[in-house]
Image (cartoon, rainbow, N blue to C red):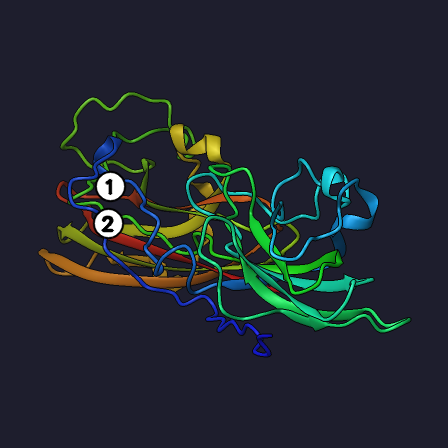
Amino acid sequence: MNNSCQRAAVVLAAVLVLPVAAGAQSGGGLRAAVAPVLGDATRELLFVPLAPCRIIDTRKVSHGFLQPGAIRDFLVAGVNGFLAQGGTGGGCGVPDGTAQPKAPAVAINFVAVGPAGPGHLTAWEYGEPVPGASIINYSNVSGLNIANGVVVPIDGTTLHPFDMHVQAAVSGTHLVADVTGYFTRFPIEAFSEPSKDILRGAVQPNPTDLSAANPDPTEQGAGRCERVATCTVTTPVGVNGKVLVKSWANVQLAHVNGTHDRIIVGPRTETPGELSAAPRCHPVVNQVANMDFELPDVAPTTNIDATISHGREFNQLGNTTVNYSLLAKMFDSPSPGDQVESARMVCLFIPD
């Protein structure tokens, strides 16, 4: 009988700032935001606790007793099929993935109930070979049901019909299993970096009205709002937190003595549908000073290159998807050649 126990090393989410793919251009000269590669789908995971919830109870189904040597298959993620294995209808809140798992590992409390004699249980990911470690060693002792809480890798996708194999060895037993949490990897950081994304547009009477036509693509005008970078954050079910936004912009101002050049760059939240529409820029006007770059009238005639940066925090509820846009606006008396040369925004979700 194998007396060793499975152990799992859990690496909390590590943030890597990676460049977007070259040539991934979208409309308006912006590169599409690309989710980073944070290891693979089974590493650098964040634990999401769940209230204990039953996924398996073989006492409640016909032919449920685990016979020694036979491999049994069970569901862990998703919402369907749990009643057939004695679990909770609708599942226990472990999310199901498609091509890759959203929950590649789960914390499960296993109980060997009424074993026929001495033996042990092994549990492992569906479709993988049998490991050499048991999760429970049990025996037929009156009034004693042996339990053990372990972390088990699962398939966690809709590509396969089940998530986990379980095998009883030496003697059979009934099995009861409760999920207490899962480990997940989700996009927590993305950025886009435009190249020479010029703030175009003629002067408009209402700076928040972006419907006016752009008569001359080379003319710089007050009131025009540009979306220069985006990132999207999707939070796990039941996990509220804060999104920390760090942004940078490299700006060029072709200043002429006697004019007043000013550019404001700042982040704001947008619903997913807003990304396809003209950005609403008026909240940017109220950004803090380090994203508000201004040249007074008396400054000498010259080209000014400057990098400005900013950090801001947003609250975000669990199980939501929010777009964060970095918006730029020229106003007062911009000169031809005023532009945002490049911009970058990093979004980091930190659970409460």
User: Which residue sits at x=37%, y=23%?
Assistant: 211
Q: Quadrant of the N terminus?
A: bottom right
Residue 339 location (% of width, % of height): 19, 46
Q: Is residue 231 left or right of residue 107?
A: left
Which of the labelled discs sits on residue 108, or is there none? none
User: Which residue sits at x=77%, y=49%?
Assistant: 58
Residue 24 visible in this rendered orientation of the protein: yes
Question: Decide: marks 2, 1 in contact (CB < 8 A)?
Answer: yes
Residue 272 location (% of width, % of height): 47, 35
Query: Residue 41 is drawn in which quadrant?
Result: bottom left
* Front residue of this view, candidates 150 and 95: 150
User: Which residue sits at x=11%, y=60%?
Assistant: 300
Judged from the image, the secondary structure of the residue bearing numbered disc 1 is: loop
Task: Determine which residue is flagged by label 1.
Answer: 31
> What residue type is disc 2 on?
Val
Distance CA(mark 2)–CA(mark 1): 8 Å
Residue 273 location (% of width, % of height): 47, 30
Residue placed farthest to the bottom in the image? 3
Crowding near the residue tagged with mark 1, few <14, some 14–19, many ≥20 C-alpha atoms within 10 Å: many
Which of the two discs, 2 and 1, sits closer to the camera? Answer: 2
Task: Determine which residue is flagged by label 2.
Answer: 20
Sequence-wise, the earlier of marks 2 and 1 is 2
Q: Quadrant of the C terminus?
A: bottom right
Q: Is residue 144 left or right of residue 222?
A: right
Q: Is residue 340 left or right of residue 233?
A: left
Query: Residue 175 is drawn in which quadrant?
Result: bottom right
Crowding near the residue tagged with mark 2, few <14, some 14–19, many ≥20 C-alpha atoms within 10 Å: some
Residue placed farthest to the right in the image? 143
> What residue type is disc 1 on?
Arg
Judged from the image, the secondary structure of the residue bearing numbered disc 2 is: loop
* Front residue of this view, candidates 194 and 214: 194
